[in-house]
Amino acid sequence: MQQCYIFQGEIMPTIRIGDEVWEELKQRAIPLEDTPNDVIRRALGLESGKAGRRQRARTRKQGTAQKRKGTPPHAFREPILQALSDLGGSAQEKDVLDRVEQAMAQQLDDVDRELLASGRSKKPRWRMSAREERRIMAKKGLVKRDCPRGIWELTEEGLAEAKRVGKESKE
């Protein structure tokens, strides 16, 4: 039996989405205005009754959306693998991210270094993207999920991938 709820007079089924999809929905949302349903409707080309206002807002945002996004999470995979490999396969998150920052220093720009709210503190956008990539890597079995808080550790599969990436970068 499917769970549903009523929102703004419409019956809405409950759906489950992955973290990566949720992050993309947040990136595409108009802050303080959109619901997940609004974002999905736009992505599918199903404009709502608010189409005129949404179109103006989207047009206004399109010019800066690419600039705001920063380096995508997948760009951090190889530097994370290399850093963990160099640190013996397991290390404190801070140590890994410090090495990632050094490795990517030429690629990170002002947008990546912009401070964003993260819990009670503010962290650079690039660190949040790197942490998102670590979550994706855990889902793919490259890093362990069950490590103590703040510890990142490669799995056997992750160690093999780090070696492969290391060989390719030396060639």
Image: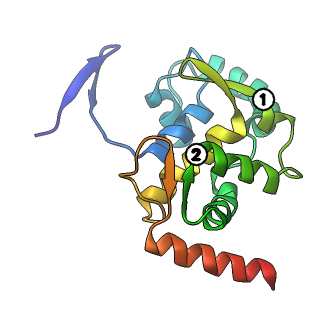
Residue placed most toward the observer, 154 or 45? 154
**How many numbered circles are shown?**
2
Name above or below for residue 21 compared with residue 84.
above
Q: Nearer the viewer, mark 1 or mark 2?
A: 2
Which dot marks residue 155? none
Q: Secondary structure at mark 1?
A: loop
Residue occupying image coordinates x 56% and y 41%: 24
Q: Is residue 75 left or right of residue 15?
A: right
For the residue marked with disc 1, what is the amino acid? Glu
Residue 109 percent location from the top left of the image: 86, 41
Which residue does the numbered mark 2 point to in the structure image?
93
Which dot marks residue 114? 1
> Which residue is outermost to the right?
106
Residue placed most toward the observer, 69 or 129? 129
* Colouring mode (rainbow / by chain / secondary structure / one colour): rainbow
Name above or below for residue 75 compared with residue 40.
below
For the residue marked with disc 2, what is the amino acid? Glu
> Which residue is outermost to the front?
88
What quarter of the picture does the C terminus occupy? bottom right
Residue 135 percent location from the top left of the image: 49, 50
Residue occupying image coordinates x 72% and y 53%: 100
> Which residue is outermost to the left?
1
Q: Is residue 167 left or right of residue 121?
A: right
Q: Kindly tell me whether residue 71 is visible in this rendering.
A: yes
Q: Secondary structure at mark 2?
A: helix
Q: Is residue 127 left or right of residue 59?
A: left
Q: Kindly tell me whether residue 45 is visible in this rendering.
A: no
